[in-house]
Every structure is written in C-alpha cells, then in structure tokens.
Image (cartoon, rainbow, N blue to C red):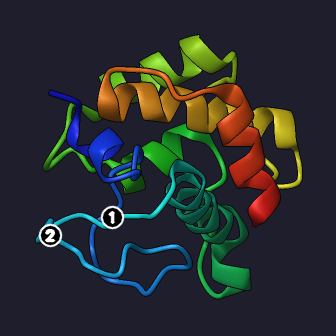
Amino acid sequence: MEPRGIRNNNPLNIRKGNNWKGERPHQTDKAFEEFETMEYGIRAGFKLLKNYISGYGGKTKPFNTVEKIVRRWAPPSENATQRYVDFVCQDSGIKPMQIIKFTDRPTMVALVDAMIFVECGQRVSRDVIQSAYDLV
C-alpha cells in the first residue's frame, strides 16, 4: 500500500484547512488535503513554504532556514523534529541555519525533495517537483 501522502497526491502531508488550486472535488481523507495531481499537491507545499520564508509577506517573522521551517512544519509535539532537520540538511546539502530564498529554485527543489522523503519514505520525481515549483 502506498503512503497516504502519495495516495492523496499530497506528499508533504498538508492538513485540511485551505482551499487549494487542484484539490480533488470529492475528498475522502478527513485530515489531509487530496489533490488531482502530484504537481498540485507539491505546489500547495511550495505556496506554504513561500509564506513561511517571507513571513507571510512581512506580517510575521520569517521562517527562512531549514531549522525554522521544519520546526514549524513538523513541531516537536508531533514529530521527531531534530531527526527531520538533520535528514533534510544532509540530503539537500542545505545548512540548518542557512537563509533560504524562495526565488532560489534549486535550493527550494532540494528542500522539498528531502521533506517529501521524510514525510512519505519515498521520492517523487525531481521533474515533478520542479514543475510544481513553476506553478507557484
């Protein structure tokens, strides 16, 4: 059986709560979003990360490092957050406190690729991740 995030075309396991472009019209998962395609699911993740990195357009402090992003995305109350940070940094080559800019496509793709692996235990094609980034 495929991981929930893969079945839902939501490999970053975004919880319900927003109306997203590309959502499946009929949702059966009560907790997590379901998307029509993998690109739309990953696009939603990129949109969230863009908000984190920008501090929601300057309204809050930015979450613009792997350390800050993962602590918000996967809080210690629910996750092995430090292991998540460590894996993402090792896999992507991004340092824990390196400032990330959303406009840095290669870094964003590497970040999301590593996060997907942590969330689902398997990879999604880099081409699909890049295509999703381009939809933002």
Residue 58 vs 2, above or below: the answer is below
Element under disc 1: loop
Residue 7 vs 22, above or below: the answer is above
**What x and y, as percent, mark residue 120?**
32, 31
Mark 1 Cα shell of 10 Å, populated few (<14), some (14-19), many (≥20): many
Identify residue for label 1.
34
- Closer to the chain start, of discs 2 and 1, is 2
Is 11 placed left or right of 96 in the picture?
Answer: left
Whether residue 98 appears in this view of the structure is no
For badge 1, the amino acid type reads Glu
Mark 2 Cα shell of 10 Å, populated few (<14), some (14-19), many (≥20): few
Identify residue for label 2.
28
Whether residue 34 appears in this view of the structure is yes
Please state which of residues 25 and 67 is positioned toward the viewer in this rendering. Answer: 25
**What x and y, as percent, mark residue 130?**
76, 41
Is 100 placed left or right of 28 in the picture?
Answer: right
Is 9 placed left or right of 79 in the picture?
Answer: right
Calculate the distance from the C-alpha at mark 2 to the C-alpha at mark 1. Answer: 8 Å
| Residue found at x 66% / y 40% | 129
Quarter assignment of residue 57: bottom right
For badge 2, the amino acid type reads Thr
Quarter assignment of residue 121: top left
| Residue found at x 37% / y 73% | 24
